Image (cartoon, rainbow, N blue to C red):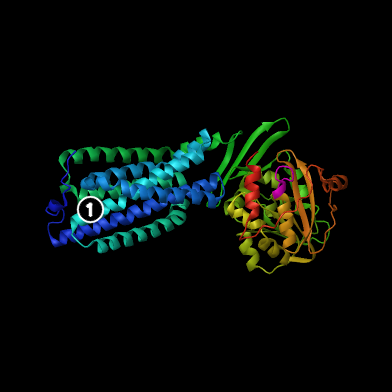
Amino acid sequence: MTTTDDPATSEHHTGTTPSGRRWARASLLAVVFVCAACGLVYELALVSLGSFLIGNTATQASIVLAVMVFAMGIGSLAAKPLQPQSITAFATIELLLALIGGFSVMGLYAAFAYLSLYTPGLVVVAFVLGLLIGAEIPLLMVLLQRIRRQDAGTAVADIFAVDYIGALIGGLCFPFLLLPLFGQLKGALIVGLVNAAAGCFLVFVVFRRDLGRTARVVLGVCAVAVVAVLIAGLALAGRFEVTARQALFRDPIVAAERTPYQDIVITERRTALGPDTRLFLNGDLQFSSIDEYRYHESLVHPAMAGQHRRVLVLGGGDGLALREILRYPDVDEATLVELDPEMIRLARTDSRLTRLNESSMDDPRSTIISADAFSWLRDNRQRFDVIVVDMPDPDESATAKLYSTEFYALVGAHLAPGGRVVVQSGSPYFAPKSFWCIGATLADAGLQTVPYHVDVPSFGDWGYFLAGTTTPPLRLASPERLRFLNESELAAAAVFPADRPALDMPASTLMDPRILRYAQGEWSVY
């Protein structure tokens, strides 16, 4: 492979006239813009995938950014000996970047689903992508100098200005365009195609006369192969995602949705007790239809002992807590605030969920709102007799804020006089630090708490905190006989065994989300 990469002779070929040089320079800067956008999308795709699969967005972002920035520095140094062959080197790097970046999400998803090697795979992929991205700028600088000689400071300013603008556009396109329209798998592959197209345009159009015949043929064949593989990946992405997702679950998947907020999966299998329908959010079990009534009866009915004409549910997008609330004929209004509109849609339309929640979301007393609970509480001034906080466990950054002093203070401000709030609080057996930290956080928000726990076979020992501005009594006031909970069971629920005593834990706040560290640390061993 031969090229005429000598800067002293290249101007004879690239941009022989002032207008030609201006066109070549503008084209190169446009490629810098596109490459920068693609590079940032690759970074964001890795962070986003990790937050969906592993949780803890802060940790995932730290790993990806730290490894990629480190690798970019090495890539810049590694590009120095490639400068005499800058055209062919840049073409090779862009094709590799398009191929590896395009398939990065698919490869890491496969590592997670089939090999349980996600984090090592993430480090390797982030390092390789950073290495290639870091080599781009030095080579592009050389190519810019080939087109028109200019002082180094001006060339650096031009390159980096366009590079940063491209990063801005890529950063905005990822959450607002690529994810909603194509999802993570196809989005990364499409960006890989764009990356390959930009590199090919620069090499085969702008610098076509600077490449020898052999180099054009070899690079052309490689470019066609990379594009063909990426297109094949796009065609097979849907089938791959279905197969890989099923590998993560024991039971057959009957419904699945990837939303901007979470990965929703419903599985179902036949058992001796009937169909076992299970809901998973980001891989975490939310309920099993075999025993969900134990969880939801224990969550709702102790809080309903007292005035309960106006009830608020925060979370609980499956409609099961709402079902229990609506068993009380004297409930005038039940408001449910759920972040994910797709979860609301499934709860209203999926026959498996409507059978379980008894179409509670379509009850005339129900008001369903799609909003972030924290923001909704800040903007709303209504007061409620009962507030049910049925949020996913605080093992991710996004949910940890919903277990903070600040959040519980907002909840308390929306309680009517004599009102009660109940919070699902995880397992006092498997995660005792997390459980008692929630109690301490409620107390730090000015609420008086009563802890209790029950056995839910799908979860194990599971706990709750009943709270109010004064200490609420732990009693039952059900309009009908319940399947699980009764006065004797509830009285026993207030007793904690000697091997799981109350712990004196600090509160969790927005600025110091201790609950996140406790939850991740305790559940990681199970």
- Looking at the rendering, in which quadrant would you find the C terminus? top right
Q: Is residue 9 magenta?
A: no
Tell which residue pokes out farthest to the bottom in this image. Answer: 381
Q: Position of residue 78 (x, y in %)?
A: 31, 46
Is residue 130 left or right of 326 when viewed as pictured?
A: left
Which residue: 63% across, 61% down?
374
Is residue 318 left or right of 210 when viewed as pictured?
A: right
Q: Position of residue 262 (x, y in %)?
A: 56, 49
Which residue: 71% across, 34% down?
274
Height in image: 472 above or below 217? below
Q: Which is more toward the observer, 30 or 359?
A: 30
Local SS, label 1: helix
Height in image: 178 above or below 379? above
Q: Position of residue 303 (x, y in %)?
A: 79, 55
Tell which residue pokes out farthest to the top in this image. Answer: 272
Q: Amino acid at mark 1?
A: Leu
Residue picked out by circle 1: 143
Task: Kindly indicate the quadrant of the structure image that contains residue 23.
Answer: bottom left
Q: Which residues are magenta?
A: 426-433
Name the magenta segment's main secondary structure: loop
- Looking at the rendering, in which quadrant would you find the N terminus? top left
